[in-house]
Amino acid sequence: MRKLLKKDYELVDNVVFPIVERCGLEGCETDMGNPFLFLFYVPEGNAEAKVVAAANETFHKLGVLPAERTLQIGEGSDYCYVTESESGDYMLAFNHPVAMSFKEGDEEYQFTIKYDSEQQAAEALAWEAETLALVDGIKKGRLKVKSPDGYLVLAGEFYDAIELGEKTIEYRDFTKYNINRTIGLKTVRFNRGYGSKGKPPKQMKWEVKKVVLLDDEENECDPFSVPEDFWPVTIAIHLGKRIQ
């Protein structure tokens, strides 16, 4: 995205302030650190409806929200949102409208792709279904390591940190591939990279104390006893003593 110019800021002012005045809002001001974040001050009575009307008209005119969509207080898309602060002020925020100057085929055109709630919902459902299937596979023993003595390849910096005792947990994404290489491990051999032609990689072997699952807030649970409301995203391998 090119550097913002004075005319880009004027574009925002010329769109926002007339709408604020016409919608009967008492006034608004911009955050000096972010010229695309506006605070709306509204008179008592029917305040929320006025803010919603002003916000959606602003978003539509700036091209950061599809014309067929509207947002309510507390809602947002990839490029704009409207919310109420703890102090009772309403806040309107949106991405730089200069991005709308990109044309299809430009290197950064993807920045202007509109939010698709149906697609996002479908992706979320697909992720949930896949996660539940993986959890069920672990519980029923379909997904696990073939041997309790496994191996993993590490980048040099992570290998060195484990070797020095600075790193005692190795993490992997919660995927079928990684489940089949980690769940059920008793020992693990680490390779430092893949080595080079004619020279095998440096290796070390460790005891595995436990393997647990983590959610996106880093809460952990046993992989064979996952609660219904627990959504694992990471596998954590806790290391014990070095064997060799």
Image (cartoon, rainbow, N blue to C red):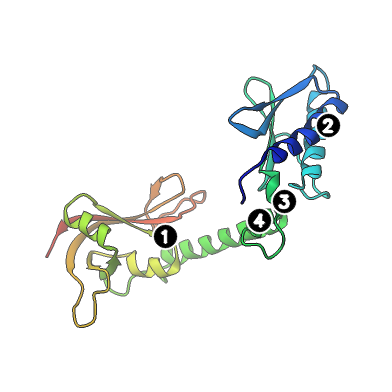
- The circle on residue 173 is 1
Instruction: Give the distance between the C-alpha atoms of the residues marked 4 and 3, in whole angstroms.
Output: 22 Å
Residue drawn at x 29%, y 68% as measured from the top left: 153
Residue drawn at x 76%, y 39% as measured from the top left: 11
Callout 3–callout 1 Cβ contact below 8 Å: no
Q: Position of residue 149 (x, y in %)?
A: 23, 70
Residue behind mark 2: 19
Q: Amino acid at mark 2?
A: Ile
Callout 2–callout 4 Cβ contact below 8 Å: no
Callout 4–callout 3 Cβ contact below 8 Å: no
Element assignment for label 3:
helix
Q: Is residue 49 above or below residue 156?
A: above
Element assignment for label 4:
helix
Callout 4–callout 1 Cβ contact below 8 Å: no
Element assignment for label 1:
strand
Q: In the displayed orientation, state which residue is furthest to the front.
A: 6
Residue drawn at x 80%, y 36% as measured from the top left: 15
Q: Of callouts 3 and 1, which one flags the residue occurring earlier in the amino acid sequence?
A: 3
- Residue 95 position by quadrant: top right
Q: Amino acid at mark 1?
A: Asp
Residue behind mark 4: 120
Categorize mark 2 by other alpha carbons within 10 Å: few (<14), some (14-19), many (20+). Answer: some
Towards the viewer: 192 or 241: 192
